[in-house]
Amino acid sequence: MSARHSAISLLWCAAIQQNKSSLTARTATTQQASHHHAVYTIHMRRLFPLSHRATIITICLAIFLVIGGIVGTAIGWRKILYKLQGTSHVATLDRSPGLAQFPEVNTQALSPTRRKIVQLAQAEFAAQPAGTKYSQGAHEAWCADFVSWTMQQAGAPLKNPHTGSWRIPGTFTLREYYESAGRFKPADSGYQPRPGDVAIYRASPVFGDHTHIVLRNDDGMLTTVGGNENNKIRVFANQQRNYTGLLGYGVIE
């Protein structure tokens, strides 16, 4: 055998021996880790018997569910508080019959959508159907349903941010919709509402939590038409100009 071949053989044997040593070391490390894991497992089982572990898991799961419930229902609680505050003035709400006749509204300068809203409101005021017509059969407070139905029929449907439906059954979500669409004008913004705009109230001493459609704006005295006002469609002229609780307006364009 040549010297070259002898050198190669020596190198090959050395490599094999090194691999064996490395494998032996890894095996020892693995066995040591397994031993430590087994010791840890035995220790934990002694420290926390099966019944205790089940209790701990149950507690952790309960905490997780509580935290998730708190986060998930934050909006729901806001709506509940919103509703409770809105009912604080129920005894003082205006119960007057409103105007007997639909007011004259100059629609010549209005957009086709605003004109259609006024025409629809006038027809529904004359017909005085049940509120279930606007709520898709649901028996509920239907002021926001009336607004939703009118907008849908006028070709300017709303979009419920939670369901995607054209119907928004509550004033809280109605305001959310207009804000998200960039079409909400706060009451203190200086905006002067026009026929077809939607007024939204919270805890108003006159209307409670309510919404209705603006028909006229006579130097700050609004004449409106709204559903579920004394359980009917009412035209109301706010001659006292009491706008406490007015949040603002949802505008058409």
Image (cartoon, rainbow, N blue to C red):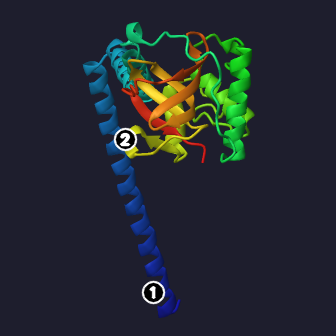
Q: Residue at x 55, y 45 (%)?
A: 181
- Name which residue type carries label 2: Asp
Q: Residue at x 59, y 12 (%)?
A: 140
**Callout 1: helix, strand or loop?**
helix
Q: Is residue 185 left or right of residue 121?
A: left
Q: Is residue 201 visible?
A: yes
- Name which residue type carries label 1: Ala
Answer few, some or many: residues within 10 Å of disc 2's Cα (few below 14, many 20 plus, some between 14 and 19).
Answer: few
Q: Is residue 225 left or right of residue 69?
A: right
Above or below 49: residue 176: below
Q: Residue at x 74, y 24 (%)?
A: 123
In front of the other: 58 or 170: 170
Query: Mark 1 or mark 2: which comes first in sequence?
Result: 1
Q: How far apart are the two marked residues, 1 and 2, measured between alpha carbons?
A: 95 Å
In front of the other: 118 or 107: 107
Q: Residue at x 39, y 45 (%)?
A: 189
Judging by the rendered image, the residue that carries numbered circle 2 is 188
**Callout 2: helix, strand or loop?**
helix
Judging by the rendered image, the residue that carries numbered circle 1 is 7
